[in-house]
Image (cartoon, helix red, strand yellow):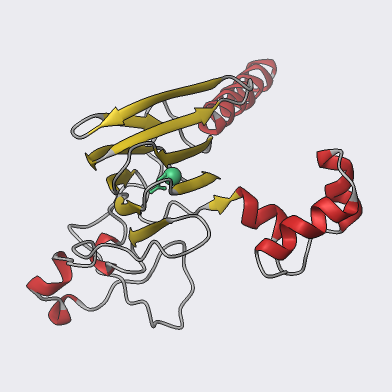
Amino acid sequence: MAAMVTLSSSCVQLILCLSVLLLLPLPYSSADPEPLQDFCVADLNSSISVNGFPCKPASEVSSEDFFFDGLINEGNTSNVFGAQVTAGNVLAFPGLNTLGLSMNRVDFAPGGINPPHSHPRSTETGIVITGKVLVGFVTTGNVFYSKVLTAGQMFVIPRGLVHFQMNNGTGKALTLTAFNSQLPGTDVLPLTLFASKPSIPNDVLTKAFQVDEDVVNGIKSKFGV
Ligand code: GLV
Ligand code: MN
């Protein structure tokens, strides 16, 4: 009887240890889950809601599902920021579904900026294709890292950190960026803070930025709020 009690308490200990181990993060970890099949071309119109998108039936998949020409054309930079991000994520390119990666094309007019933003679900890497671009990010310890890059030079932005790119040259600039997520998500800080729907109350913003209400209203008005 005593032996049985000892045995069952060590079993309990073993189960507790295994549970703790299961809760620990795995030593390897990609931003998106690993795929469980060769491909799962997204059915963007399915009424089923899952983490990602359901697969379109394999019998309906064709070569066209694995090629995407949405990044061929220069983006329209006639906007307040003078830059345009064209996304090659799963919403535009359903063949990426479950594969854990995507790309953007970012066009810059002279002086244009891809304003401070973050990607909650992804690390970003990128390469300057043409022009001269100031790339910077800030760590959670509030340290700013930056460099001016020219054609062929790469950068990396650790997952979730606030970053920007600004055209630092006299002509247009172009970068291509890549993500370890099929849908990295983007919080564009000026829009997140000053153009959310519904709006963040002015007293939150005046206190957060230590400015008067007319400053907050002035910024909001730039974004049509
Ligand atoms: C650049 O920062 C991008 O998000 O494409
Ligand atoms: Mn980015």
Q: Is residue 118 visible?
A: no
Residue nearest the viewer, comparing 100 with 87: 87
Q: Quick check: 9 above or below 193?
A: above
Q: Quick check: 27 above or below 100?
A: above
* Residue drawn where x is 17% and y is 57% of the image: 38
Drawn side of residue 15 relative to residue 108, left or right: right
Q: Is residue 136 visible?
A: yes
Residue 156 locus on image (x, y percent): 36, 30
* Quadrant where the image shows the N terminus: top right
Drawn side of residue 214 relative to residue 76, left or right: right
Residue 151 locus on image (x, y percent): 20, 35
Residue nearest the viewer, comparing 87 with 116: 116
* Quadrant where the image shows the C terminus: bottom right
Res 218 → quadrant: bottom right
Drawn side of residue 29 relative to residue 207, left or right: left
Q: Quick check: 121 above or below 54?
A: above
Residue 52 locus on image (x, y percent): 41, 63
Res 13 → quadrant: top right
Which residue is outermost to the front?
170
* Residue drawn where x is 25% and y is 38% of the image: 128
Residue nearest the viewer, comparing 135 with 54: 135
Q: Quick check: 170 above or below 77?
A: above
How many discs appear? 0
* Residue drawn where x is 46% and y is 78% of the image: 48
Residue 157 locus on image (x, y percent): 42, 32
Drawn side of residue 107 relative to residue 222, left or right: left
* Residue drawn where x is 73% and y is 56% of the image: 219
Which residue is outermost to the left?
63
Res 63 → quadrant: bottom left
